[in-house]
């Protein structure tokens, strides 16, 4: 196993869902590679609460690279958090769609004032 | 012309739940705009300038009523067990929300649910996700820090997600 393989398998390793031969290969690699061993630490401790707390930053692409990788690794193996992310994104879409132009109840308006503002604006700019 | 003024009233309605307050805010904003026209530098579009004045007037209206005790939304936030895993995870039917988002009844439902959010969360949600102001501008208008905006927005979205959950979770007809 090389470091690229390890990056791919790490989250599955942590969740104990790899077949035994791959677990052995992963542990053998970890025993000789300080880089991969240290990269595993944040993955070991990250929990759903931390993932959900950082979803807004994740969607705005403001998470530091290491946190983003940890988050995506967690999402790859945690269907609850993946579902939460999707419904969180749906909530934002629904919010925006609820107020799209023309979707709100019709309203009358203080047209005289709008008209006066626009007319005065024309005078000041003209 | 009618559509333009209507949009201004719509902005105020999103921030203020009370129709009379929204109308007052628009009236006040337009009077302010009329008085302040000489100061309109012309860098922004007139519509953006008026929009901003309406947002300000609506927020002033909230402030003029005095600060209410902050309502808790803890019961609308995700719950976790001791190890930090969700205790009541739910799954929304894939694609349903997007498919029905444009329907009139969905829009009304979502507007009602947004209306159920406590004021400090609803205001941030409206300014950031609907009016699409950035965190800095929202923070300036609300006189809070950009970090507080970020935290409130995330909590507002989480609370709204919980309020919408019964209507969108898997198994909902």
Image (tube, grey):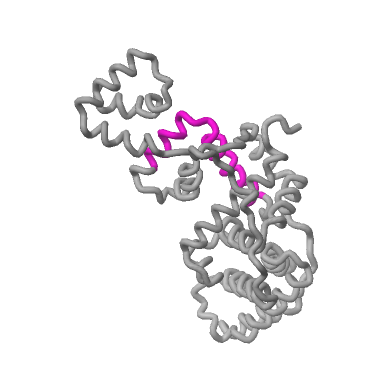
At 55% from the left edge and 33% from the top edge, which residue is drawn?
A: A80
Give the residues in magenta: A68-97
Q: Position of residue A13 (x, y in %)?
A: 37, 24
Left or right: A8, with B42 as reference point: left
Image quarter of residue B62 = bottom right
| Above or below: residue A13 compared with residue B48 | above
Q: Position of residue B143 (x, y in %)?
A: 53, 72
The quarter of the image holding the C terminus of chain A is bottom right
A48 falls in the magenta region = no
Of B37 and A46, the residue lying toward us = A46
Residue at the image point whose x is 63% and y is 54% from the top: B73
Horizontal arrangement in the rendering, residue A65 relative to residue B24 (left or right) = left
Prevailing secondary structure class for the magenta stretch in the rendered image: helix
Please identify the quarter of the rendering in which residue B79 is found. top right
Q: Nearer the viewer, residue B7 or A11?
A: A11
> x and y percent of residue B71 in the render?
66, 61
């Amino acid at each position: 196993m090389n470091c690229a393989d390890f990056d791919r398998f790490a989250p599955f390793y942590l969740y104990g869902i790899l077949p035994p031969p791959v677990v052995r290969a992963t542990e053998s690699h970890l025993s000789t590679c300080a880089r991969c061993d240290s990269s595993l630490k944040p993955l070991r401790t990250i929990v759903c609460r931390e993932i959900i707390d950082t979803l807004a930053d994740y969607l705005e692409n403001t998470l530091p690279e290491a946190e983003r990788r940890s988050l995506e690794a967690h999402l790859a193996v945690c269907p609850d958090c993946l579902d939460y992310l999707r419904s969180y994104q749906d909530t934002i879409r629904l919010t925006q769609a609820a107020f799209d132009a023309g979707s709100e109840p019709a309203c009358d308006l203080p047209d005289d004032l709008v008209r006066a503002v626009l007319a005065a604006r024309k005078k000041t700019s003209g | 012309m009618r559509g333009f003024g209507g949009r201004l009233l719509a902005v105020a309605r999103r921030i203020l739940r009370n129709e009379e307050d929204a109308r007052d805010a628009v009236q006040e904003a337009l009077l302010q705009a009329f008085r302040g026209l000489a100061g309109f530098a012309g860098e922004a579009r007139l519509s953006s300038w008026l929009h901003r004045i309406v947002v300000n007037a609506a927020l002033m209206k909230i402030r003029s009523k005095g600060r209410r005790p902050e309502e808790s939304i803890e019961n609308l936030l995700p719950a976790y067990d001791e190890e930090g895993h969700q205790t009541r995870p739910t799954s929304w039917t894939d694609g349903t929300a997007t498919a029905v988002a444009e329907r009139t009844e969905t829009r009304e439902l979502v507007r009602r649910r947004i209306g159920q959010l406590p004021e400090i969360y609803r205001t941030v949600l409206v300014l950031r996700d609907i009016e699409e102001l950035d965190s800095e501008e929202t923070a300036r208008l609300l006189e809070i820090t950009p970090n507080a905006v970020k935290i409130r927005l995330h909590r507002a979205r989480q609370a709204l997600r919980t309020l919408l959950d019964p209507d969108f979770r898997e198994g909902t007809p």
